[in-house]
Image (spheres, grey):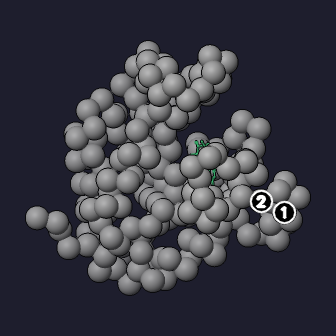
Amino acid sequence: MIPLLGGLKKGLVFVISAPAGTGKTTLVRMLRDEFHCLIESVSFTTRKPRTSEKEGVDYFFISKEAFEQKIREGEFLEHAQVFDNYYGTSKIFVEKEREKGKHVILIIDTQGALQLMQKLDAVFIFISPPSLEELKNRLYRRNADTDETIALRLSWAEKEMALAPRYNYHIINENLKIAYDVLRSILIAEEHRNPPQ
Ligand code: 5GP
């Protein structure tokens, strides 16, 4: 049975960080399919779209100049440079959805999450692979990156994984079904949490 969720007047924010190849996209997709009270935040980026990506669905793709203008105008809840590109979460996007009662999921890197820990009442979740060795195997199996990019992703993953204890929850995705059960349990529990008195 699907638990009845989505009864809050103002939605919650879930911040998820995970190295590439951890299964975060699959896990969040499963969560969205089960719980319609959830929406994934659409970030702005200066990265070029990949062939399967759609404007306004995967990201809002903008130029570096337009991104810098948005920083000056204070439009981002957080922003960071990840590898060679800028990424930022739109304040208005998140606020509008929360006001509709939707829970907003931000899938952002650790730099962005650390900024939000200072200023936003949100639920912070880190998803790890079982080990760096397993992550390396998954990245090779995925066949999406060159050896050089994989080496870069692995060294960045190691740095990100060292920050996992700073998050409220840490899920190790060794088995997708178990990881998903933990993730959905967090959502259900957080929706039932009393606000501080
Ligand atoms: P990709 O280019 O593969 O879509 O994303 C690269 C990294 O940027 C991922 O770790 C992703 O979570 C992160 N990212 C995506 N959007 C944002 C954002 O708005 N802010 C921050 N800080 N990181 C983001």
197 vs 188, nearest the viewer: 188
| Residue 66 visible in rendering | yes
Packing grade of label 2 (10 A; few <14, some 14-19, many >=20) is: some
Residue 69 on image: x %, y %: 86, 65
Residue 1 on image: x %, y %: 11, 64
The numbered mark at residue 62 is 2
Considering only vertical position in the picture, is 190 above or below 174? below
Disc 2, SS: loop
In the rendered structure, the answer to whether residue 11 lies left or right of residue 57 reads left
Residue 170 on image: x %, y %: 38, 40
- Write down the residue under mark 1: 66
Quick one: which residue is furthest to the front in this view?
A: 51
* Residue at disc 2, CB closer than 8 Å to ligand 1: no
Q: Marks 1 and 2, how far apart in space?
A: 6 Å
Q: Within the image, what quadrant is residue 8 found in?
A: bottom left
Disc 1, SS: helix
Callout 1, which amino acid? Answer: Ala
- Residue plotted at (33% across, 70% down): 36
Packing grade of label 1 (10 A; few <14, some 14-19, many >=20) is: few
* Residue at disc 1, CB closer than 8 Å to ligand 1: no
109 vs 119, nearest the viewer: 109
Q: Within the image, what quadrant is residue 116 found in?
A: bottom right
The numbered mark at residue 52 is none
Label 1 with label 2: CB-CB less than 8 Å: yes
| Residue 132 visible in rendering | no
Callout 2, which amino acid? Answer: Ile
- Residue plotted at (48% across, 62% down): 40
Considering only vertical position in the picture, is 55 above or below 132? below
Residue 131 on image: x %, y %: 40, 21
